[in-house]
Amino acid sequence: MPEGPILVILKRAAEQFKGQKVTDADGDGKYIDAAILKGQTVTDFKTWGKHFLICFPEFAVQIHLMMFGSYRINDHSAKQARLHLEFANGELNFYACVIHLIDQPLDEVYDWSADVMSSHWDAAKAIQKMKEFPKLLVCDALMDQHLFAGVGNIIKNEVLFRTKIHPLSLVSSLPADKLKEMVAETVNYSFDFLKWKKQNTLSKHWQAYQQEICPRNHIPFHKKNTGKSHRTSYFCDACQVLYHG
Ligand SMILES: [Zn+2]
């Protein structure tokens, strides 16, 4: 599943179309009638967590790549795109994504301070919000898009390994410094993810995600679906501390 840093890469790649008029638009019609985009000028591209936003003067198109979505720029696959936008200088195509039209101001729809890749990211606010949920597990907190928009399963696993926190720890049981460290490392790792993805070396840097052996203790990782999010956690009992009660 594309996590936040991938959306930042998409945004940068799409920026060549900012200020450009959509000369033609079509799609499979599953979510929107693409014809309404024809003749519209792109005013901006934005991201919020795993959402990609194509901004037009009166509304925005929200694209969520979900588990299997993909995009192609100045290139297309043989199958019909869910959304195909043509410009004088190229084309933008999205496949297997979910699309919504947003006609409210984006600042009313999105809390930019919850996006780990945003310059508006607010660590103190994230900590404050987590305190409202005393039974929240760290593995669920990191996957919660209202708390850490953009974080997915790769970031979750790598952050918990880096900070030596067991995924089934309770947020409320973490010492204050440890909680701060987890939040700070979530942003740090997300930017490392971005850098390594651009270098095409992301998976080479995985220390826990999809790994068999803990690189610190040289013993097998546990691989389990954890928490309400039921996503796979890779963790080591020897070096990742369970904070519980
Ligand atoms: Zn270990």
Image (cartoon, rainbow, N blue to C red):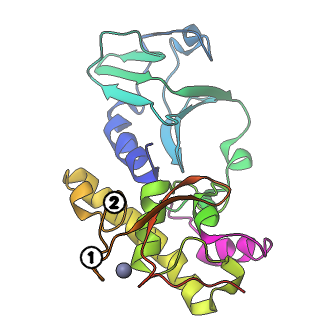
Q: Is residue 186 visible?
A: yes
Q: Residues within 10 Å of mark 1 (few under 14, many from 20)?
A: few
Inspect the magenta stretch and tell me whether residue 129 lies in it: yes
Q: Amino acid at mark 2?
A: Phe
Residue sitting at x 40%, y 72%: 188
What SS does tag 2 mark?
helix
Q: Which residues are magenta?
A: 118-138
Camera-side mark, 2 or 1: 1
For residue 193, the mark is 2
How far across and how far down the image is residue 140, in percent?
63, 62
Q: Nearer the viewer, residue 121 or 191?
A: 191
Residue sitting at x 50%, y 13%: 39
Q: Nearer the viewer, residue 163 or 195?
A: 163
Quadrant the C terminus occupies: bottom right
How far across and how far down the image is residue 184, in percent?
49, 77
Inspect the magenta stretch and tell me whether residue 80 lies in it: no
Q: Are marks 2 and 1 in contact (CB under 8 Å)?
A: no
In terms of image quadrants, where is residue 175?
bottom right
Q: Amino acid at mark 1?
A: Pro
Residue sitting at x 52%, y 76%: 166
